[in-house]
Image (cartoon, grey):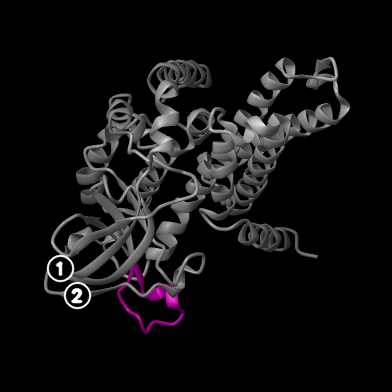
Amino acid sequence: MKDEKGLREQEDLILDMLDRFLDTEVVPHVRKLENDDIYPAEIVEKMKAMGLFGCTISEDYGGLGLPTTTYARIVERLSRTWMSLSGIINSHLIMASAVQRNGTQAQKAEFLPRFATGELRGGVGLTEPDCGTDLQAIRTTARRDGEAYVVNGAKTWITNSMYGNCIALLVKTDPTAEPRHRGMSLFLAEKGTGFEVVKKLPKLGYRGIDTCELLFTDYRIPADRLIGGQEGRGLQQILSGLELGRINVAARGVGVARAALEDSLAYAQIRKTFGKPICEHQAIQLMLGEMATRVEASRLLVESAARAFDEGRRCDMEAGMAKYFATESALSNATDALRIHGGYGYSKEYDVERYYRDAPLLTIGEGTNELQRIIIARQLVERNPA
């Protein structure tokens, strides 16, 4: 096990390598790929070679075994350059986390090495046409039939489902169970007969990445793909992974907020009005000062949540705080950046309009920010009884 110095050195090497990769392999292509909504296949292959699909997977299974604090910094850098890239590894690593934390030894041995290399790549199948934040309302069912389960239902807004080949699929194995979560189970579902990608969904932002509707029609899945080997534990299994997902989305918020700040800071020193750079106007200074404070506060909240996750502590409140504040900061910074850039901010010649389109998703995905505030409040009461 690496000591603290060794971890810092490893992190520095990884982040330096990532910065070079983003500058040379991603930055020159982002605007075209994003504007044309093109899946970045070549970039994904290079991400596989760098080991990014195994960021948080244990070294015992061929992953990098990085702490969540390092992973959050990777996500921040990816999102500073192009937020869509962070989604390509995030959903995948939530699926991997569900197996690493809850899978049988056989499932870990079979799937985690393939997840780490990106041979098997995908995400999580949770959301349905009539079900988003309230996961207990899902309708997709899995009925036991001998040594398999037969799945019927639909999922929507599923990331990595067109170009990926496996998802962690949340279903009802007992639709009549009360409370409802006792009838929910989580499966590793590889593509096959009856697993149909219906269409790729057009989006305001977060383009390039594949987000799709799925249909399951008498899709048969082997019984040994039930994560953990027992029915009725699916909701708890996926919720533990969603803590990692919320830390990821919070780190994305830091990245987008940082990008908006850095672009605005540079532009404000070049653009002149009334005979001086606009950074010398008090109105612009007030915005820049607040934007910078949002970035730093968001980063500290993310680090706090990531540290709690690494230590195995319950961190739904910490992850909720980080997700809520950092994503709202991204939205606010993107809006302020648009104002600072004026007409140019509304033009595709600059990246600011992309931040402005990407940021709203962060306040919705991985649990709405309204839900995060409720989680925070409930945990505050539970942890601080009168």
In the displayed structure image, the side of residue 65 where residue 331 appears, left or right: right
Q: Residue at x 54, y 57 (%)?
A: 367
Q: Residues within 10 Å of mark 1 (few under 14, many from 20)?
A: some
Give me the disc on residue 242. none
**Image position, residue 77 (x, y; %):** 51, 27
CB under 8 Å between callouts 2 and 1? yes
Residue at far bottom of view: 176
Within 10 Å of disc 2 (Cα), the crowding (few <14, some 14-19, many 20+) is some
**In the depicted structure, whether residue 365 falls above or below residue 72:** below
Q: Which mark is residue 144?
A: 2
Q: Residue at x 45, y 30 (%)?
A: 31
Q: Position of residue 317 (x, y in %)?
A: 63, 53
- Depth order, front residue of 208/152: 208
Q: At 71% across and 15% down in the image, what residue appears?
A: 270
Please state which amino acid type lies under the numbered disc 1.
Ala
Q: Position of residue 177 (x, y in %)?
A: 39, 82
Is residue 190 in sight in this rendering? yes
- Up the image or down, 312 lies above or below 9; here it is below
Question: Over which residues does the magenta segment extend?
Answer: 171-185
Q: Find the residue positioned furthest to the right.
A: 282
Image quadrant containing the C terminus: bottom right
Q: Would you say 107 lies left or right of 73 here?
A: left
Per the image, the residue denoted by label 1 is 148
The three-letter code of the residue at mark 2 reads Arg
The quadrant of the image that shows the N terminus is: top left
Residue at the location (58% across, 33% down)?
347
Q: For this view, does 384 lie left or right of residue 126?
A: right
Q: Is residue 319 magenta?
A: no
